Amino acid sequence: MPDMANVGKNTPRREGPEKLTGRALYLDDHAVPGCWHGVTVRSSVPHGRIKAIRFDPGFPWGECAIVTAKDIPGKNLVTLIETDQPLLADGLVRHREEPIVLIAHPDRATAYAAAKRVTIDYEPLPAAFTIADSLAVRAKIFKDDNVFKSYLVQKGDLEKGFALADVVVEGEYSVPAQEQAYIENNAIAAWEEDGVMVVTGSLQCPYYVVKALKVLLGRDEKHVRVIQTVTGGGFGGKEEYPSMIAGHAALLTLKCGHPVKIVYDRHEDMAATTKRHPAIVRQKVGLKKDGTLVAQDIEVLMDGGAYATLSSVVLSRGTLHAAGAYECPNVRIRSKVVATNTPPNGAFRGFGAPQTLFAAELHWEKISDALGIDSLALKRKNLFKIGSVTSTGQILRESVGAAECLEIAVKRSNYAAKRKEYDRWNKNPKNPTWRGIGLSVCHHGAGFTGSGEVYLASRAGVALTKDGRLFVLAASTEIGQGTNTMFAQVAADALGMPFDWFTVETPDTHKVPDSGPTVASRTTMVVGGLVQRAALELKCALEAEHGRVPKTSADLKKAAAALCGELPARRFEVEYEKPPEVVWDDATYKGDAYGAYSYAAFVADLEIDKTTFEVRVRKVTTAQDIGKAIHPLFAEGQIIGGSTQGLGWALLEEPVYKDGVMINSQLTNYVIPTSLDTPPFDVTVVEKPYSRGPFGAKGVGELPMDVPGPAVAAAVKHATGKLIPTLPVTPERIAEALK
Amino acid sequence: MIALTVNGKKKSYRGAPFARLIDVLREAFRLTGTKEGCGEGECGACTVLLDGEPVNSCLIPVCQAAGRKVETVESLGTPEKLSKLQQGFLDCAGAQCGICTPGMLMSAHAHLKKCGGKADDASVRTALAGNLCRCTGYQHIVDSVLSAARKTAKRGKKA
């Protein structure tokens, strides 16, 4: 075993003291001398041709910088996966709030006033707002059929499977969009410095922004530099949209010759930027009388909004998790993500999996009624274990903590006894509430889907400077989850050195290598693994060239001199290497979809007021297998925080759209959980180490988002006897179900 | 001219009397610890104390603070010498992304000043109900505040 002086310890957060004293500088806290303020004029129709852009002649336009599509020096594209999304609409708008004109002014209030003096005339076109509209091609948005992407997963023989079934249970489930609701709105600044476009701001993926700016500006990587500022939350919401804002800021700074800041207000951020994909999932499941799964036929439909953004990969993850954490010999999963005339949906913690897992998990309650067997017994019978084969034919060889998580959550929540106790409580008409307890158990693949990690070919490094300072070099961003602290812990233990010796370099694309995006629960497992390997390379060099690994700072200085010689620093960089046992075929969607899965079981204990139908979650008990908690307190923070977002989605949060635009784009009417809405959590971290993860670690970021929805809906079913297949489970939906 | 006391220092502001207090603090006085999350008094990221009471500084015109005492996160501790409350947040992982933290600290600070060592889970949750956090799920924040309350209580007994 490696020496672990830091890994597994609750080291104080690296940037904690700055954050706690108000000294951490988020984008809008930076005083940018001479900076102008950028604002965006957006479309007011969901689909239409731009006939004219008119500027009020009574306004002093000479003081402003104005940018439209024709000012773009390179390609008018937000480069990501497809090439369908323009940076500024040119001739055609495909959704409300689509950017058309950019304005900058030295005074922020004047910039906002200017935006109101621009009028855009449209020729309206038919619009498609729902998945059904889109499939019927009520409006043509993407190619001929509006389908951004579809997948087919097949295992065994579906027909034979259903023929073997004693019972077949069908159900349809639907989930809404969800707003990431980071507390810091999107914010980016840009300026030119010696022919280099410098962009800085609140973002998750610096190299995504570089890639987009290169195409937009027609420049190479040397002439584009992206630096992350302290970032006030991401949750996927700052994965791809910052590329759009960065492009806007870059064009404005080129136009006016001054630095430009674009800081969204809450309304703009909520109305215009990406959300979780709404989805409809149809489950048809065949079982033997004893509850053994024999066939699963699953159909997934997601609403991608007007442009493809990350929809194909969101759908991929949703598809790969759609059968749940259960083994079934015969499976078919068909999935599609379609275009609608609504602002594009994109990344949000869980990335398609919470949508399909909600259906997969809640469907067990329906199966339970059909078979007359408790859902817990059914889950125990079919749950993944070592040797199980997934829907893509992946054999789970190691690190499968599903059953252990389930048993811990069941025991610690007193699930069986509570079920009986609440049955008695609910029979008494004098009680003012109904009580229910429900559980879910889910898996979540860590890292990029399928061959994604191979294509990314991520790099990370460790550097030793001539004067004896140590740096961790990675493009992974600290967005609250603890990256700064965790990377230093991993590097320190790999080298057997003190934590304090390591500085984690700011993600600056002119200083750090491309470690891939900060998404997909990959920072610890994948990039943390690269940091560990890079640190071990430095260790080898120290042993070879200095004769030992320094234990004192004086010796570190000597070692630095020996290793660096005349060089300012020595860099040890490594690239992702695919483990040989991970085999995936993109063409057939067969094989090892992910290197490893994390597992979670979640028990929601709640009561419902019989008069108001308000749901109060009294307690949450959860156990989550994440391989190894590098920092147990931060891991617990991810679990509680992610689960709370899941509880919000389950009970409170629902973007309401009218004519293709979110009408509750405020924190006043888009309600997220407060301290009073959030129950006490009982968290157990289960550690089934993954041999390819650093110190055994798997992913933790997204998993907690998967479990609350189905557990809450199952508990509501226990309390009321009604299965509500739609989130959020609002008082209105409960009232409707009880009618 | 509007005269007010900010973090114990006398300050004067010459500008629009209906400028939002948050803008005056951040832009005129360069105290950027106070954050804007929603601009409509929902999220609490901009919470400061006005004569000791927590308020949303995005809803307060600066003229309303004339002659009064404003306290912001900058009044608590420094990175080198954190206050007990800030230390509680560091020990119990009460801050993740950190953007809600200054407002959260000010609401918690006001609460602890009122009830000190008597703070409990329910009272802290009520005191912080106007401060939204999207990262933590609140439990570690509540733990942080209670940890500071316990230290305050201990010191109180000794004294």
Image (cartoon, coloured by chain):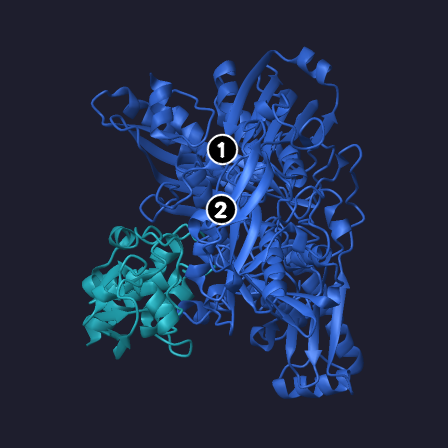
Chain colours: A blue, B cyan
- The residue wearing badge 2 is A180
Instruction: Looking at the picture, tell me which residue is in the foreground, B128 or A372.
Output: B128
- The residue wearing badge 1 is A176
Instruction: Looking at the picture, tell me which residue is in the foreground, A456 or A58.
Output: A58
Give the image location of residue A106, x and y in percent.
48, 66
Q: Quadrant of residue A732?
A: top left
Is any atom of residue A576 visible in this view? yes
Q: Is residue A663 left or right of residue A592?
A: left
Secondary structure under tag 1 reads loop
* Residue placed furthest toward the front: A57
Image point (75%, 34%), residue name = A589
Label 1 sits on what residue type?
A: Pro
Label 2 sits on what residue type?
A: Gln
Give the image location of residue A364, x and y in percent.
52, 24
Number of numbered discs overlaid on the protein picture: 2
Mark 2 nearby-residue class (10 Å; few <14, some 14–19, many ≥20): many
